[in-house]
Image (cartoon, grey):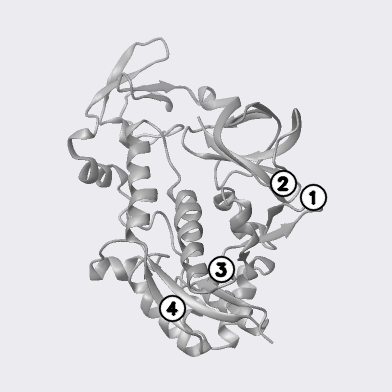
Amino acid sequence: MSKGKVVVGMSGGVDSSVAAYLLKEQGYEVIGVTMQIWQEEAKEVMEDNGGCCGLSAVDDARRVAEMLDIPYYVMNFKNEFQKNVVDYFVEEYLQGRTPNPCIACNRYVKWESLLKRSMDIGADMIATGHYARIKQLNNGRYVLQTSATKAKDQTYALYNLNQAQLKRTLMPVGEYTKEEVRRIATKIGLQVADKADSQEICFIPDHDYGKFIEEVAGDRVPGEGNFVLTDGTVIGKHKGIIHYTIGQRKGLDLAMGRPVFVKEIRPQTNEVVIGEGEDVFAKQLLCKNINMMAEEHLPVEKRLRAKIRYSHHGEGCIVRQMDRDTLFVEFDEPVRAITPGQAVVLYEGDYVYGGGTIV
């Protein structure tokens, strides 16, 4: 008796491949789907970029699907990806912010678009190879729970999933460590057992964000401007605000005789504000575009733990709701490089309580 029909987003990597295997073993009717979301790839890029959206992913995913004896399809999501990820990424940099394209891709492409199309073909659920778990709380709401392996936990990049999406999602590898997942893949003879994890932003394989934005945005890209101190003193010329982010030290080419850092980016005046090491620490932030998981509305005040970037270990904080779409977060200790455009994700124990975009 089948537990239901589930579409597994298969990237050709070991995690999504093992996810498909585990769900089939658990009694689900599994369909493999690779989302074609980036435009074109040269052969050398295909070989370098074994990422979740490369054309090279299709060959590996198809081989895995054949071995698991499950139906397999490639679905085209190029338009959705262009609008919700690439265009968003470029616009944010032009406004002096530092976006997180993976969070946007997860919410609006890998979930919203894939879930809709999967429902259209009669599926009950979708599944991915993310290192996270989904739990239903006593109040009926669905939350993300950190994965069994803290080192690979991906809840930060998934905080923006809504209740309807969480309700219809399975994440089977969240119960395993990466080593255990690779062992399962080896045991069942998957060729991708030792495939390297994808790195960085998939649509910029050479990691040169500035060049990419210049190619896409053309004459809309702000040109050179002034490096300034907080008081407005001009100390040099910068290459353009798209080349900088809060907390950056390298690549400034400023002869100050000591390490200095990007403290603020001012798109209105095309200025990059430079400060000392202590200047990039702060105890407070505001975030908007909030997504609540554990409760529909935040109480007047709540003690939580917050991460301000994927690699951040987290810091204790008090969170207050300012209005329907704004949270004020006050940290116990100053945190480094709070960056507009990035996400702040709030945790209660090992659950994601909610989060938003830092403004």
Q: Earlier in the sequence, mark 1 or mark 2?
A: 1
Task: For marks 1 and 2, give the CA distance.
Answer: 8 Å
- Residue type highlighted by circle 2: Ala
Q: Is residue 153 visible?
A: no
Task: Say what secondary structure mark 3 lies in.
Answer: strand
Q: Earlier in the sequence, mark 4 or mark 1?
A: 4
Q: Earlier in the sequence, mark 3 or mark 1?
A: 3
Q: Verify CB contact (< 8 Å) between mark 4 and mark 1.
A: no
Which of the two discs, 3 and 4, labels the residue nearer the N terminus?
4
Instruction: Tell whether label 2 touches label 1 (CB within 8 Å).
Output: yes
Instruction: Please name the residue that numbered disc 2 is placed on.
Output: 294
> Can you tell which of label 1 and label 2 is closer to the viewer?
1
Residue ID at (46%, 49%): 104
- Cα distance, mark 2 to mark 3? 21 Å
> Label 1's element?
loop
- Element marked by disc 2: loop
Query: Disc 4 or 2, which lies upstream in sequence?
Result: 4
Query: Which comes before the other along the chain, label 2 or label 3?
Result: 3
Amino acid type of disc 3?
Answer: Ile
In the picture, measured across the screen, residue 145 lies left or right of residue 276, that is right
Q: Which residue is mark 3?
A: 126
Camera-near label (4 vs 1) is: 1
